Image: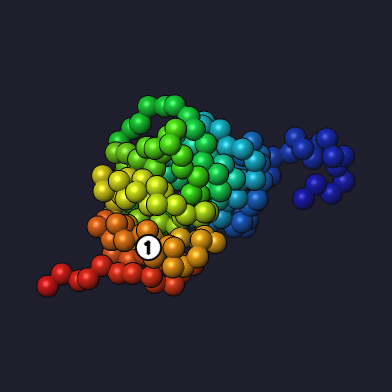
Amino acid sequence: MCSGLREEECLSCNFDTPQLRTLRCAWSDVARFNAPNLHRLHIVQWFPDICPIPTCKNLRHLRLLSASPQTIRSNLMAFPVLETIAVHRLLYSRGRSYSFMHSCLESMTLPLSLDAARPHLFIEIFDEVHLPKLQKLILVGRLKKSHVDLVTDALAVTSCNVQVVDFRTNTPQDEVVDIVESLLSVVREVSLHGKVLCCRAPRN
């Protein structure tokens, strides 16, 4: 795209890319692209709490290297037709929570990086956010009983419709089965790498 330009000139370019559908870049570069058909965005650097608002409003899939609960919420408000969001690392931050609804989000992927210092981290993500189409929560990382308890507590107070929690973990399957049963009080199905482990019995 920058043929004939020196590197320093290329770095200052803005790009009109109406056919671009997938983009992988730093967060500070997003606003340089006029990409009305962009559907997939992967941010490969640390993501601040104040997110850029690109010209594209049709983004469907967002992947962030790292983000705080406030950043996740900000992106849900910025991208109204987002269907999936994935975060590799959760950051701590302070900020005021606002009530809002996102009517398109279907799947969320989060890391299992919870600790005793911030037991309400998941609740901060979901607090006062109405997600009527969110049906699948994917959790990645080493699984502990404390993680299951925190996720169960968070989903119990959220305004969403999570039906499936899928764990992407190296924890042995028998250990996972032993500690995930409490989740069936708030979701219909628990799976491991997409394979169903246990289901809630249907009501008569």
Most foreground residue, 198 or 144: 144
Query: Which residue is disc 1 drawn over?
Result: 178
Mark 1 residue type: Asp
Q: Position of residue 43 (x, y in %)?
A: 61, 45
Residue at 65% over, 50% down: 24
SS for dot 1: helix
Using the image as rendered, state which of residue 191 and residue 10 is in the foreground: 191
Please indicate, yes or no, whether residue 98 appears anywhere in the rendered image.
Answer: yes
Residue 106 lies in quadrant: bottom left
- Residue 74 vs residue 203: left or right? right
Residue 110 lies, in percent from the top left, at 48, 50
Q: Residue at x 55, y 44 (%)?
A: 89
Instruction: Compare residues 105 and 147 and report the one nearer the observer.
Output: 147
> Which residue appears at 32% of the width and 39% of the height?
127
Q: In percent of the image, x 38 and y 70: which residue is there?
A: 197
Q: Give x and y (percent) for residue 47.
A: 58, 37
Furthest-left residue in this view: 204
The crowd level at tag 1 (other Cα within 10 Å; few <14, some 14-19, many 20+) is few
Q: Quadrant of residue 13?
A: top right
**Count of picture labels:** 1
Q: Against 185, is 55 above or below?
A: above
The colour scheme used here is: rainbow
* Left or right, 179 with reference to 200: right
Question: With 110 as the anchor, is 18 left or right in this view?
Answer: right
- Indicate whether 184 appears above or below 5: below
Tell me if residue 31 can be seen.
no
Which quadrant holds the C terminus?
bottom left
- Report the front residue among 45 and 204: 204
